[in-house]
Image (spheres, helix red, strand yellow):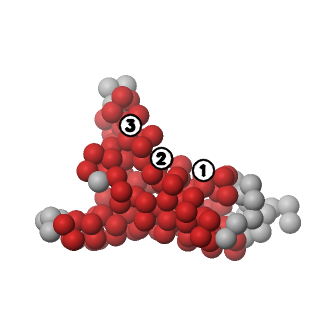
Amino acid sequence: MTRRGSLAYYFAAVAVGSLALAGSLWLERRLAGVPQPGLLNLYFLCLLTGSFPTLVFAFLLRRVMSLRTCRAWHWALAGAGLSGLLLWVLGGVGPWLRPVLAELLWRVLFEGASVVLATNPWVVLPAGAATAGVLFLVHRAFPAAGQ
């Protein structure tokens, strides 16, 4: 949190990331003809189970992309790749940690990634790209603390 605007950056990451994932899940299920909850219900569930992975995603994305000046499409491409990698790591590690962690803590930290990894892991790629595109705009809007 060395830049100004970090609170706005991470708040936007959770709000937009959860909305992008909910929209991606909703659209994928709608096109498949699967009965589903409404978009607002999915958004709420994504907020509950996706906040931790989204914060980790935003932190790693900012660190990786701060190494050089990039354009929005660089951020979107890196966001898609990072979201897939993060889903694979958290979804793979989550079941191993389930016996060790308290049930509520495991649900908050790892259940969202485990469920998405088990059902359709490809939905995180457009959600990660869209979230990274918005985070690029927030990151660019605030100068570094030393400037």
Give the vertical position of 92 relative to 82 (above or below): above
Which label was assigned to residue 86? 2
Q: Is residue 77 left or right of residue 70?
A: left
Amino acid type at circle 1 is Leu
Cα separation between marks 1 and 3:
18 Å
Cα separation between marks 3 and 2:
10 Å
Q: Secondary structure at mark 3?
A: helix
Amino acid type at circle 3 is Gly
Give the vertical position of 44 relative to 84 (above or below): below
Residue at (50% x, 65% y) in the render = 129
Which label was assigned to residue 60? 1
Which label was assigned to residue 92? 3
Residue at (43% x, 65% y) in the render = 126
Question: Decide: marks 2, 1 in contact (CB < 8 A)?
Answer: yes
Amino acid type at circle 2 is Leu
Q: Which tag, 2 or 1, sits closer to the chain's start?
A: 1
Q: Which tag, 1 or 3, sits closer to the chain's start?
A: 1
Q: Residues within 10 Å of mark 1 (few under 14, many from 20)?
A: some
Q: Which tag, 3 or 2, sits closer to the chain's start?
A: 2
Q: Is residue 27 left or right of residue 134?
A: left
Q: Which residue is farthest right?
A: 147
**Any part of residue 17 in sight:** yes
